[in-house]
Image: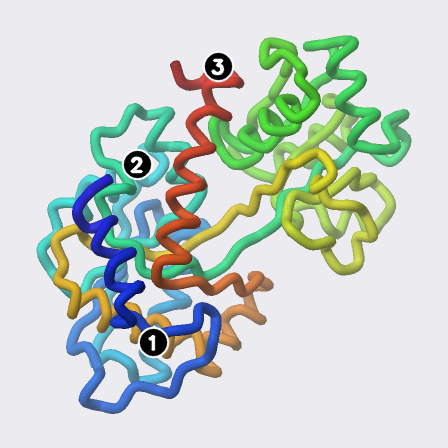
């Protein structure tokens, strides 16, 4: 692992980073304010990473935690173009949005830039994944669906987002949990949840995987049946089990990292700013408006979480044949 990564754990252990992940913090005094904060969304405008960056901009500005906040977009290759730019960044007041999608993109794009070489700051939000089937499907449970895959192989089609993304990774993990050969997976990727939803409702595929938000209304309307969700706890209103009994847990998380080159003091200052933002009413309003789940985590706990995510995503992508 990189020097910055090891430093992240050491700083947290010595107490330089605010204690208590997920705990509120008092608003920063004017003396704590960063003069100019830069936030990079490593994607084109409009997507989840861009929305996260601009929600941070709104909250930090509203809570007066920085004198100015600038958001830039650097799209391309699942965020790895932006990641490369981050590794060359020398500013000590610079954050980049990241998440599970980037963990997979680093592997599928064989990126020279890696998340291990960044400075972890905080996990911010997450969304559970859900596996669904059309309402009249013969598959009543996730075990039913996986048994059909084991028996019929590519005769059972599962749709989701882009190849190598969160949805595809979850499909691979579910097959692995039942010791089903990866070659049996017939995954039909679409660029957006709307397209996969249309394929499900049109009976063009047997099952679908997406973030809960993409399918929730159709589940409530009785047009889709949810077989289970991927987070650590059941999703309110869905009344379906998690995949814990299969040993599978996956959340589509988003967070922020800083350049590898920043000092321990700069890391402390950025962590405090994000912690104060998390405690602000402005950020709570953004979470409510966007419908995001608050999964705030900083310090060594976030570093450990990221390391575990990186460690398990590559084998999952190897299992489904996207990475050698």
Residue 222, compared with residue 287, is above or below; it is above
Give the image location of residue 206, x and y in percent: 76, 23
Q: Judge whether 284 appears above or below 194 on screen.
A: below
Frontmost residue, 64 versus 106: 106
Q: Element type at marker 3? A: loop
Residues 205 and 93: in front is 93
Mark 1–mark 3 Cα distance, whole angstroms, equals 42 Å
Which quadrant, please, contains the C terminus? top left
Q: How crowded is mark 2: few (under 14 residues within 10 Å), some or many (20 or more)?
A: few
SS at mark 2 in the image: loop
Task: Where is residue 95? Give x, y as percent.
Answer: 26, 59
Q: Is residue 158 left or right of residue 289?
A: right
Dot in front, 3 or 2: 3
Question: Which of the labelled discs sits on residue 76, or is there none?
Answer: 2
Which callout, 3 or 2, points at the residue further toward the start of the chain? 2
Residue extending furthest front? Answer: 14
Residue at image mark 1 = 60
Residue for point 84% across, 50% down: 221
Residue 164 image offset from top left, x and y in percent: 47, 27
**Label 3, label 2: how far apart the Cα atoms are:** 22 Å
Q: How far apart are marks 2 and 1 (CA)?
A: 26 Å
Determine whether the residue tagged by mark 1 lies in a helix, strand or loop. Answer: helix
Q: How crowded is mark 1: few (under 14 residues within 10 Å), some or many (20 or more)?
A: many
Residue 321 is marked as 3
- Residue at 65 percent across and 11 percent down: it is 184
When the figure is inspected, residue 53 is found, relative to residue 212, above or below; the finding is below
Specify few, some or many for label 3: CA neighbours under 10 Å numbering under 14, 14-19, or 20 or more. Answer: few
Q: In this view, does 3 lie above or below 22?
A: above
Instruction: Residue at 62% x, 28% y: name it.
Output: 171
| Left or right of 127 on screen, residue 42 | left
Tell me which numbered mark, 2 or 1, is placed earlier along the sequence. Answer: 1
């Amino acid at each position: 692992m990189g020097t910055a990564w090891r430093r992240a754990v050491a700083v947290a252990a010595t107490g330089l980073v605010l204690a208590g992940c997920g705990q509120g913090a008092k608003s920063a005094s004017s003396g704590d304010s960063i003069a100019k904060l830069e936030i990079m969304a490593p994607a084109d405008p409009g997507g989840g990473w861009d929305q996260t960056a601009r929600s941070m901009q709104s909250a930090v500005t509203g809570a007066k935690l920085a004198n100015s906040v600038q958001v830039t977009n650097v799209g391309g290759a699942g965020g790895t173009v932006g990641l490369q730019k981050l590794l060359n960044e020398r500013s000590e007041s610079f954050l980049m949005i990241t998440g599970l999608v980037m963990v997979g993109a680093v592997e599928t794009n064989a990126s020279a830039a890696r998340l291990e070489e960044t400075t972890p700051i905080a996990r911010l939000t997450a969304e559970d994944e859900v596996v669904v089937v059309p309402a009249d499907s013969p598959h009543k449970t996730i075990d039913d669906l996986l048994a059909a895959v084991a028996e019929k192989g590519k005769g059972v089609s599962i749709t989701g987002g882009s190849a190598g993304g969160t949805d595809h990774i979850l499909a691979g993990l579910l097959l692995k949990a039942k010791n089903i050969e990866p070659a049996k997976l017939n995954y039909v990727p679409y660029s957006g949840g709307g397209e996969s939803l249309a394929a499900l409702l049109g009976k063009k595929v047997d099952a679908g995987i997406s973030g809960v938000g993409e399918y929730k209304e159709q589940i409530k309307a009785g047009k889709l049946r949810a077989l289970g969700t991927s987070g650590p706890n059941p999703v309110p209103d869905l009344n379906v089990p998690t995949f814990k009994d299969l040993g599978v847990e996956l959340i589509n998380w988003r967070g922020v990292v800083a350049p590898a080159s920043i000092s321990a003091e700069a890391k402390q200052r950025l962590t405090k700013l994000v912690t104060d933002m998390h405690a602000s009413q402005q950020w709570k309003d953004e979470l409510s408006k966007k419908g995001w789940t608050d999964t705030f985590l900083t310090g060594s706990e976030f570093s450990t979480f990221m390391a575990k995510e990186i460690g398990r995503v590559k084998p999952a992508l190897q299992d489904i044949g996207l990475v050698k």
